[in-house]
Image (tube, grey):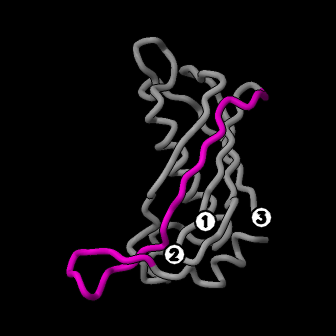
Amino acid sequence: MLVNTRTVEIEFGDCDPAGIVYYPNYFRMFDASTAHLFEAALGMKKIAWIRQFDIVGIPMVDTGAKFSKPSRFGDVVSIESTITEFRRSSFVVGHKLFSGGDLAIEAHEIRVWAGADPERPGGIKSRSIPPEVVAALSR
């Protein structure tokens, strides 16, 4: 599977009064890392692949993380992201965040390939993940 790595500098606003990253901000970083993974695989920004495949997005239905080492303001971390499992209309993304060369966080997201629901205005409905998307992320 394709692994995409991106570097993130921890900013002041990412941190809580104790000076470490406030944990929900990691999930924001992981969300962005998923978008970067798809961009690397498909060769286009998120807005473009959402339009090309006529979907509303890839909403998260489950997430979790194991935190082993905190990150602080000014730290530069790297996040490795990859798809660990494909299902018909959902997939699992694995993230590993490294800080100072150490594995600091292992996280996962389960996301759904979702489009507009033609039977419920304003609703969404899962769709099969297109084979070309699976192929691009599987290389």
Neighbour tally class for label 3: few under 14, some 14-19, many 20 plus, Cα within 10 Å: some
x and y percentages locating residue 8 in the rendered image: 60, 38
The answer to whether residue 70 is above or below residue 28 is above
Please, what is the three-letter code of the amino acid marked with disc 2? Trp
Q: CA distance from mark 1 to mark 2?
A: 9 Å
Indicate left or right for 70 with 61 as reference. Answer: right
The mark closer to the camera, 2 or 3, is: 3
Q: Which residue is the site of mark 2?
A: 49
Picture residue at 77% right of the left edge, 64% below the top: 1
Q: Which residue is the site of mark 3?
A: 1
Determine if the magenta segment contains residue 125. Answer: yes
The answer to whether residue 80 is above or below residue 42 is above
Neighbour tally class for label 1: few under 14, some 14-19, many 20 plus, Cα within 10 Å: many
The mark closer to the camera, 1 or 3, is: 3
Viewer-nearest residue: 119 or 56: 119
Neighbour tally class for label 2: few under 14, some 14-19, many 20 plus, Cα within 10 Å: some
Q: Which residues are magenta?
A: 101-126
Numbered tag placed on residue 56 in the rendering: none
Q: Which residue is the site of mark 1?
A: 38
Please, what is the three-letter code of the amino acid marked with disc 1? Phe
Q: CA distance from mark 1 to mark 3?
A: 12 Å
